[in-house]
Image (spheres, coloured by chain):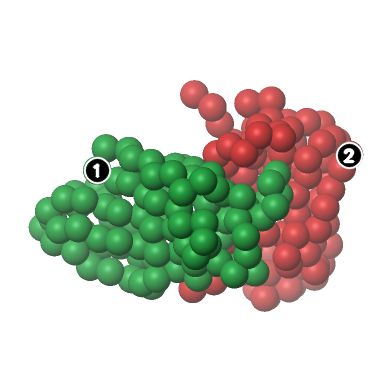
Chain colours: A red, B green
């Protein structure tokens, strides 16, 4: 079974803390994405990567950064968490260059106090 | 720019039909449809590429009208298992990340 695994399902952090959200896929996909999901707003793209060491900003990158040192792993970093970053974070991957389906992880629900 | 989905929410009785629409102001390359059940990851339903094709999956089908930049998802004879939030994701241009709509919450009741 193909899989996108997000290491933490639930996290509670304090304002100002550095937060790492890890995502690993086992499908040898080139493309990986981080989306943020909020009620009534749908899924919004934070960052994406089409190759190792490559990263591009999405629609709402402010306050976030990413790291992709290995093909299978894409990390989302909140340098200094703020309460408005309380949200559900979804990682997704797909095969590169071909329009294909996205495979999503189960999500990481982050609460910043 | 986010595509616009309508309706925002719909309640159906088992066996009823529903249509969910997705509109964009851009000349799309493809439209994707996903369903997310409560507490779960979104799951892929189907992709429609420009060309006006219609696809089907059991009792769920979809169409893509290139001229109107609009896609519709058709759920026929709904089942309880169809409940969830449906998202359309649009791709413009080719091989760019999907931009998702705000979702349509579908509830099917017995």
Q: Quadrant of residue A86?
A: bottom right
Give coordinates of residue B109: x percent, y percent.
16, 60
| Mark 2 lies on residue | A53
Q: Residues within 10 Å of mark 1 (few under 14, many from 20)?
A: few
Give coordinates of residue B13: x percent, y percent.
13, 61
Give coordinates of residue A16: x percent, y percent.
80, 70
**Numbered mark located on residue B100 in the image:** none
Query: Which residue is nearer to you in this view: A31 or B21?
Result: B21
Query: Which residue is nearer to you in this view: A2 or A96?
Result: A96
Q: Mark 2 and 1 residues: CB-CB less than 8 Å, in contact?
A: no
Q: Secondary structure at mark 2?
A: loop
Single out the residue that lies furthest toward the right.
Answer: A53
Q: CA distance from mark 2 to mark 1?
A: 42 Å
Q: Residues within 10 Å of mark 2 (few under 14, many from 20)?
A: few
The residue positioned 30% from the left and 54% from the top of the image is: B74
| Mark 1 lies on residue | B59
Say above or below: A5 vs A11. Answer: above
The residue positioned 70% from the left and 52% from the top of the image is: B93
Residue B72 is left or right of residue A60, and the answer is left
Give coordinates of residue A78: x percent, y percent.
78, 61
* Of the two numbered discs 2 and 1 in the rendering, the one whose residue sits closer to the viewer: 1
């Amino acid at each position: 079974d193909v899989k996108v695994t997000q290491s933490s399902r639930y996290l509670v952090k304090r304002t100002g803390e550095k937060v790492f959200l890890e995502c690993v896929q086992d499908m040898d996909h080139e493309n990986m994405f981080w989306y943020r999901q909020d009620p009534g707003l749908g899924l919004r793209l934070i960052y994406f990567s089409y190759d190792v060491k490559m990263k591009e900003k999405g629609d709402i990158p402010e306050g976030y950064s990413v790291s992709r040192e290995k093909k299978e792993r894409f990390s989302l970093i909140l340098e200094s968490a703020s309460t408005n970053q309380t949200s559900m974070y979804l990682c997704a991957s797909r095969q590169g260059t071909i329009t294909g389906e996205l495979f999503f992880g189960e999500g990481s629900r982050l609460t910043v106090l | 720019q986010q595509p616009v989905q309508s309706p925002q929410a719909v309640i159906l009785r088992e066996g009823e039909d529903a249509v969910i629409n997705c509109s964009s102001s851009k000349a799309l390359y493809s439209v994707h449809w996903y369903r997310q059940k409560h507490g779960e990851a979104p799951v892929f339903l189907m992709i429609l590429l420009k060309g006006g094709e219609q696809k089907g999956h059991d009792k769920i089908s979809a169409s893509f009208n290139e001229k109107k930049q609009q896609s519709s998802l058709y759920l026929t004879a709904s089942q309880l298992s169809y409940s969830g939030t449906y998202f359309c994701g649009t791709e413009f241009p080719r091989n760019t990340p999907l931009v998702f709509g705000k979702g349509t919450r579908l509830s099917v009741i017995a």
